[in-house]
């Protein structure tokens, strides 16, 4: 049983881990898939009939945008490409365990990287909607001595998001490798459905949903002021 | 696995690059196509509405024209009927007048024929009387004297008849 992360090769003195290589693979597949799938969207006239591929792509993109608009409001649409990318990447990354790869999300570096981006988005949105002074003032509310707690609260958001995703995916992975050690044939099929399919999709959804909720909470205060 | 390293930075860069590429190659083409198609469809709907309105206007116009034509035709027919009636009346009037004239002429002719016939009869009677008188009297009175006598007698008869 090996649940550690292998270092695939070194770039100079920098180690390139399994996580990074798998992520690159996912990126290549997603980007090339997108290029192929949207080929006709670039050339089609508005009145042209589209093929099945185009309908599926439109259904997915439109569905994601609709979902984001429902969750974040119309203002959220400017975040839609990032949120959609995040959701698609997380679903693929969580499910890639089914193909025998080590999920990149079972590495704290990945989940913390994603949480860092979400943190920057949340704080950036807050800063932009409240202004620098309003943002700083917000940290001292309702009382001045609440400042340390407010800071901890802000920082704990991405930390909890990162650990939740990491823990769930790693947990599933560990249980699956234990199961493979005990009963390698047929038995692991059903746990796979739960630990990879169900848990993977749910965790991808939760991470994305939390990012959306926190970003839109940060920008909602703009309307109140 | 739970220690931080270069992978952390790699993953942040990876996600940002993936985001940029996905935006470029998936989200922008699809959303821009959807928007273009929406504009196109809205244009089509507007156009259809315009055409519909125009068609309705044309229909109303043509209906109005038709009604006008119908009214004119009705007026023409009425006029023609009126004219016909007048003409019929005139013709019948003229026919009556002609009839009356012809009747009058016929009566006149009859009157003339009567007069002529009376004249002839009177002549005949005169001649006959003369002949009879000649035969009866066997006298050689002059024909002229006889005629005078008979004429007088007849005139008297006429006067007596008239009175």
Image (cartoon, rainbow, N blue to C red):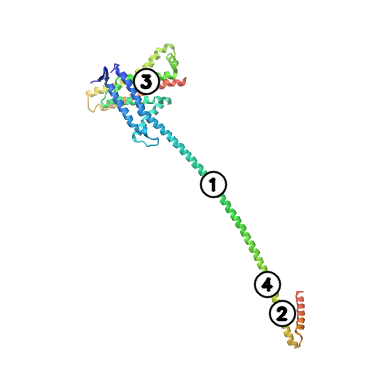
- Tell me whether the residue at label 3 lies in contact with that at label 4, contact meaning CB atoms closer than 8 angstroms: no
Q: Please, which chain is the residue tagged with disc 1 on? A: B
The x and y percentages for residue A44 are 37, 35
**Number of other residues with Cα within 10 Å of mark 4, as a class: few under 14, some 14 to 19, many 20 or more:** few
- Residue under label 4, please give it: B110
Question: Which of the two discs, 2 and 4, labels the residue nearer the N terminus?
Answer: 4
Callout count: 4
Q: Is residue B155 above or below residue B93?
A: below
Q: Please, which chain is the residue tagged with disc 3 on? A: A
Mark 1 vs mark 3: same chain?
no
* Camera-nearest residue between A71 and B134: B134
Residue at 76% x, 77% y is B155
Question: Which of the two discs, 4 and 1, labels the residue nearer the N terminus?
Answer: 1
Instruction: Please say whether residue A108 is visible from this viewpoint.
Output: no
- Residue under label 1, please give it: B65
Residue at 68% x, 70% y is B107
Question: Which of the two discs, 2 and 1, labels the residue nearer the N terminus?
Answer: 1
Alpha carbon distance from label 2 to label 4: 19 Å
Alpha carbon distance from label 4 to label 1: 66 Å
Question: Which residue extends farthest bottom?
Answer: B138
Closer to viewer: mark 1 or mark 3: 1
- Residue under label 3, please give it: A118
- Residue under label 2, please give it: B123
Q: Secondary structure at mark 4?
A: helix
* Camera-nearest residue between B135 and A107: B135
Image quadrant in which you'd find residue A167: top left
Alpha carbon distance from label 3 to label 4: 137 Å
Q: Secondary structure at mark 2?
A: helix
The x and y percentages for residue A69 are 41, 27
Q: Is residue B84 above or below residue A10?
A: below
Alpha carbon distance from label 2 to label 3: 156 Å
């Amino acid at each position: 049983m090996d649940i550690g992360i292998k270092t695939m090769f070194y770039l100079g003195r920098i180690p390139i881990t399994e996580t990074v290589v798998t992520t690159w693979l996912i990126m290549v597949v997603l980007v090339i898939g997108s290029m192929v799938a949207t080929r006709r969207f670039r050339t089609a006239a508005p009145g042209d009939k589209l093929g099945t591929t185009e309908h599926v792509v439109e259904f997915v993109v439109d569905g994601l945008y609709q979902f984001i608009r429902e969750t974040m409001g119309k203002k959220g649409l400017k975040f839609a490409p990032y949120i959609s990318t995040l959701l698609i990447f997380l679903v693929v990354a969580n499910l890639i365990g089914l193909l025998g790869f080590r999920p990149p999300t079972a590495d704290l570096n990945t989940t913390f990287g994603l949480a860092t981006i979400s943190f920057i988005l949340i704080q950036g949105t807050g800063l932009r909607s409240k202004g620098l002074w309003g943002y700083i003032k917000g940290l001292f509310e309702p009382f001045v001595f609440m400042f340390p707690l407010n800071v901890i609260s802000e920082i704990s958001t991405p930390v909890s998001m990162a650990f939740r995703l990491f823990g769930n995916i790693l947990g599933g992975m560990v249980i699956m490798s234990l199961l493979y050690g005990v009963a390698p044939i047929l038995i692991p099929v059903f746990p796979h459905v739960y630990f990879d399919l169900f848990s993977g999709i749910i965790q991808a959804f939760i991470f994305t949903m939390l990012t959306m909720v926190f970003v839109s909470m940060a920008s909602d205060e703009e309307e109140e002021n | 696995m739970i220690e931080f390293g270069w992978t952390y930075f790699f993953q942040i860069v990876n996600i940002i690059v993936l985001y940029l590429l996905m935006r470029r190659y998936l989200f922008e083409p699809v959303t821009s196509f959807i928007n273009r198609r929406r504009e196109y469809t809205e244009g089509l709907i507007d156009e259809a509405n315009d055409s519909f309105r125009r068609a309705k206007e044309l229909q109303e116009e043509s209906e109005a024209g038709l009604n006008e034509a119908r009214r004119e035709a009705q007026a023409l027919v009425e006029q023609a009927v009126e004219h016909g009636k007048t003409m019929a009346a005139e013709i019948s009037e003229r026919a009556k007048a002609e009839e009356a004239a012809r009747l009058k002429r016929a009566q006149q002719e009859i009157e003339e024929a009567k007069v002529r016939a009376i004249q002839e009869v009177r002549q005949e009677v005169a001649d006959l009387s003369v002949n009879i008188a000649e035969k009866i009297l066997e006298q050689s009175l002059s024909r002229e004297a006889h005629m005078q006598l008979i004429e007088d007698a007849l005139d008297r008869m006429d006067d007596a008849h008239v009175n």
